[in-house]
């Protein structure tokens, strides 16, 4: 069995918008979500980096106080995005309320890079300062990395599995790989895929800063994330979630669903090279790209657009370019490359899900979103980057790719094709 899988619903909550329509419009005009952190702990811990890309909309706009009390912020973000995607697919948000979806044929595949870091570290502070009796009984369900997948499956009534991918910054895209396999194998008719992250906390900020991974442009945060720029100095930490409803084409047609695009192929590899640094020639990334193309029965010349991983780190951007050069050859000059982390910051385990949402919309609307802060392009990375204005993509059956790479040597690629 090798069934076609299509995208019928999208959801997102991000530093540049609390829903998909807002995110998309801001991605086209080049909105920066980076801004100074105003929390007291920034000064308390004398953090070397004093800004981040925080979610633009409070989850309290979408979740009740009781729900928020029982969920870590990462799960809160995931729930907001999942409910939007489910409703966008034309499905009833109440559990088991939609007769068009068999719960036993509905699965969740949701990733995270870190999980409930706020719950874990707040619980540790409570234990140290107030003793074990004051540790909340919901601490473990809230801190566990499978919290978003579990909560979403409970909320929407998914009984065909609640999978969790924890592959650092490739998690959200690997969740799509699992979803595609569930659809193509016939194990599910509908899979809600995505990723969530809420790691804007003093410990991750201090740790990323210690390893020289974060930009230190404290005086101009909106200009800090600059993928492919000669003066890039690190990524901007972001937070939020992205979600996509994946269905078999037959199931979507039977209920008359609107289809954004086909998830035509995915590729997942590992570098086996270094715990944090990418393999310098992009060999693992190029294998993942080729796998996605092969799974989609597509040629490199079919691809019009790439939403690149492009974190804005000095060592990270060039291997991705070399991987694309290896796979696309001379055609790479014709590929419109967007680096949307320049706007949203790096959402870690949620980044692949959010950037897949943007890739789907690029295929659907025929536009590639912009890359901001590219003032002096690195001559060693001569990509055809979309900068300044969104770029119109060719008419016809468009093809877009999203790249995601994570600490540990994880490489994941998703390929979307117009329908």
Image (cartoon, helix red, strand yellow):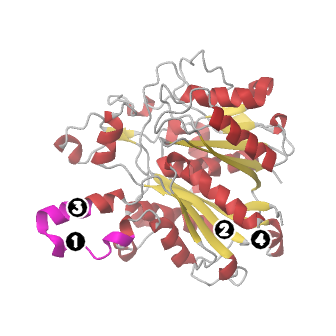
Residue at mark 1 to residue at mark 4: CA–CA distance = 43 Å
Instruction: Please tell me whether residue 177 is drawn above or below residue 32 in the rendered image.
Output: below
Residue 135's disc number: 1
Q: 359 or 119: which is nearer to us?
A: 119
Residue at mark 1 to residue at mark 3: CA–CA distance = 8 Å
Q: Is residue 158 left or right of residue 142?
A: right
Q: What is the crowding at mark 3: few (fewer than 14 residues within 10 Å), some, or many (at least 20)?
A: some
Residue under circle 4? 186
Residue at mark 2 to residue at mark 4: CA–CA distance = 11 Å
Q: What is the crowding at mark 1: few (fewer than 14 residues within 10 Å), some, or many (at least 20)?
A: some
Q: What is the crowding at mark 2: few (fewer than 14 residues within 10 Å), some, or many (at least 20)?
A: many
The answer to whether one can see residue 281 in this image is: yes
Is label 3 or label 2 in front? 3
Q: Residue furthest right?
A: 396
Task: Answer with mark 1 or mark 4, whichever residue precedes in sequence.
Answer: 1
For the point 35% across and 49% down, the residue is: 200
Assign the magenta stretch its main secondary structure: helix
Instruction: Please tell me whether residue 105 is drawn above or below residue 346 in the rendered image.
Output: below
Q: Quadrant of residue 121?
A: bottom left
For the point 53% across and 29% down, the residue is: 227
Provide the secondary structure element on which disc 2 rests: strand
The answer to whether one can see residue 9 in this image is: no
Provide the secondary structure element on which disc 1 rests: loop
Residue under circle 2? 191
Provide the secondary structure element on which disc 4 rests: loop
Question: Residue 64: where, in percent of width, then height?
Answer: 40, 74
Residue under circle 3? 124
């Amino acid at each position: 069995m090798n069934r076609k899988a299509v995208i019928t619903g999208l959801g997102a909550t991000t530093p540049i918008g609390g829903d998909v329509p807002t995110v998309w419009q801001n991605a086209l005009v080049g909105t920066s979500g980076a801004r100074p952190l105003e929390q007291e702990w920034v000064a308390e811990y004398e953090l070397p980096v004093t800004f981040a890309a925080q979610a633009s909309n409070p989850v309290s706009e979408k979740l009740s106080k009781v729900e928020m009390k029982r969920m870590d912020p990462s799960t809160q973000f995931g729930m907001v995005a999942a409910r939007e995607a489910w409703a966008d697919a034309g499905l009833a948000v109440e559990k088991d309320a939609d007769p068009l979806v068999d719960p036993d044929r509905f699965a969740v595949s949701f990733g995270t890079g870190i999980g409930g870091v706020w719950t874990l570290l707040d619980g540790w502070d409570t234990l140290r300062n107030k003793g074990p009796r004051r540790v909340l009984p919901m601490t473990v369900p809230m801190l566990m990395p499978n919290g978003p997948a579990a909560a979403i499956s409970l909320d929407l009534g998914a009984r065909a599995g609640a999978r969790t991918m924890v592959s650092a910054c490739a998690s959200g895209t690997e969740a799509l790989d699992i979803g595609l396999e569930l659809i193509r194998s016939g194990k599910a008719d509908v899979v809600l895929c995505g990723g969530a992250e809420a790691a804007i906390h003093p410990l991750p900020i201090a740790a990323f800063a210690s390893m020289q991974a974060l930009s230190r442009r404290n005086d101009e945060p909106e200009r800090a994330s600059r993928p492919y720029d000669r003066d890039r100095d690190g990524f901007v930490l972001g937070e939020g979630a992205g979600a996509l409803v994946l269905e078999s084409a037959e199931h979507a047609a039977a209920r008359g669903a609107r289809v954004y695009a086909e998830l035509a192929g995915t590729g997942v590899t590992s570098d086996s090279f270094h715990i944090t640094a990418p393999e310098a020639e992009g060999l693992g990334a190029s294998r993942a790209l080729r796998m996605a193309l092969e799974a989609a029965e597509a040629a490199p010349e079919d691809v019009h657009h790439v939403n690149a991983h492009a974190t804005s780190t000095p060592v990270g951007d060039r291997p991705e370019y070399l991987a694309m050069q290896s796979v696309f050859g001379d055609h790479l000059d014709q590929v419109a490359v967007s680096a949307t982390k320049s706007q949203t910051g790096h959402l870690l385990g949620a980044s692949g899900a959010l950037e897949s949402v943007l890739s789907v919309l690029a295929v659907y609307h025929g536009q590639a979103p912009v890359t901001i802060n590219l003032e002096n392009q690195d001559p060693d990375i001569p990509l055809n980057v979309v900068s300044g204005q969104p770029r119109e993509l060719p008419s016809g059956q468009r093809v877009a790719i999203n790249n995601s790479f994570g600490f540990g040597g994880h490489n994941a690629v998703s390929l979307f094709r117009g329908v």
